[in-house]
Amino acid sequence: MASDICALTEGTLALLVSFPHAGTYIPASMARRMTPEALQRADTDWHLPQLYGFVREMGASTLVPQCSRYVIDLNRPPEDSSLYPGQDTTGLVPVDTFRKQPIYLPGEEPTAAEIAERRELYWKPYHDALEAELARLHAAHGAVVLWDAHSIASVLPRFFEGRLPDLNLGTADGRSCATAVQAAAEAVLRAQRDYTHVTNGRFKGGYITRHYGRPQEGIHALQLEMCHATYMDEAAPFAYRADLAARVQPVLARLLEAVVEAAA
Ligand SMILES: [Zn+2]
């Protein structure tokens, strides 16, 4: 299924890879109301479908949205409660960037009615597709892994001190997948020496990981937040670096193979 809102590719493996922040499209009517800083789209999870391109050959399903997270954040709860109470975080329809620059020109911030409209138009179709594909794979295999793929600038004082570890695994503190599935991913992370890593550090998994992960029913959700620097230039124009990507892709492949095997 492909739509203007998101593109689902159906695979044969018990694995769905979701890329909720990979979109860059901002409708012209919204873009006209945004600041030049916002229109750089610096907070995009850049190039992730390209980085994870190998998963199609593995037989995984993929779900890729068209719209930027500045239109609506697909990894936030629909009612916009905070994912990290007490800590700074951006909301369902963010009004500032990770560097605290305003997204909208003065007086142009979206109203509650507009936020509700964006939720119906962009958020709901993504989640409807995600839920349906998880159900299809679960019915076919008896168990399924949902891998929520993310990436972020490695230095963002608003959210964390210093430099973020390269690979940040999130499982909602162990609640979104079986212990054996998390352990399988951690074994892969420990076995490599090229990338620093942490489990359930600053990033524990967002709405998608927490909402869909039901390990007792055989639905195992994990989030991987990676530093942009592991596969791209962190400065505009945010170029993909095939040389860097080629080093991290085998680690991603081993992670995915390990979690699918552990979930089976
Ligand atoms: Zn993200």
Image (cartoon, grey):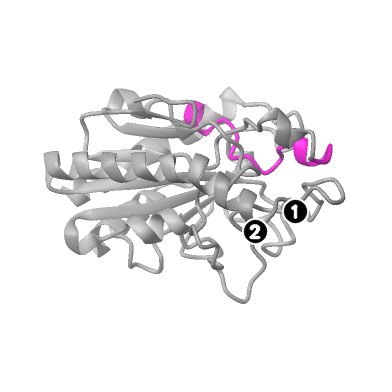
The picture places residue 41, in percent across and down from the top left corner, at 71, 37
- Which residue shows up at 56% across the image and 30% down it? 47
Q: Position of residue 42 (x, y in %)?
A: 71, 40
**Residue 1 versus residue 78 in the image, above or below:** above
Quarter holding residue 9: top left
- Label 2 vs 1, first from the N-terminus: 2
Decide if residue 202 is in sight here: yes
Q: Secondary structure at mark 1?
A: loop
Instruction: Describe residue 25's horizontal placement relative to residue 74 as left or right.
Output: right
As displayed, is residue 162 above or below residue 233? below
How would you rate the neighbour count of disc 1 (Cα within 10 Å): few for under 14, some for 14-19, many for 20 or more?
some
Residue 47 on the magenta segment:
yes
**Residue drawn 57% across and 35% down?**
67
In the picture of the structure, the residue carrying the numbered disc 2 is 90
Q: Nearer the viewer, residue 103 or 89?
A: 103
Percent from the top left, x then y, of residue 179? 26, 64
Q: Which residues are magenta?
A: 34-51
Magenta segment, prevailing SS (helix, strand or loop):
loop
CB within 8 Å, label 2 to label 1: yes
Which quarter of the figure has residue 92? bottom right
- Residue 96 — which label? 1
Instruction: Classify 10 Å Cα crowding around label 2: few (below 14), some (14-19), many (20 and above).
Output: some
Q: Amino acid at mark 1?
A: Asp
Number of numbered callouts drawn: 2
The answer to whether residue 257 is visible is no
Q: Residue furthest front?
A: 113
What's under tag 2, amino acid-wise?
Thr
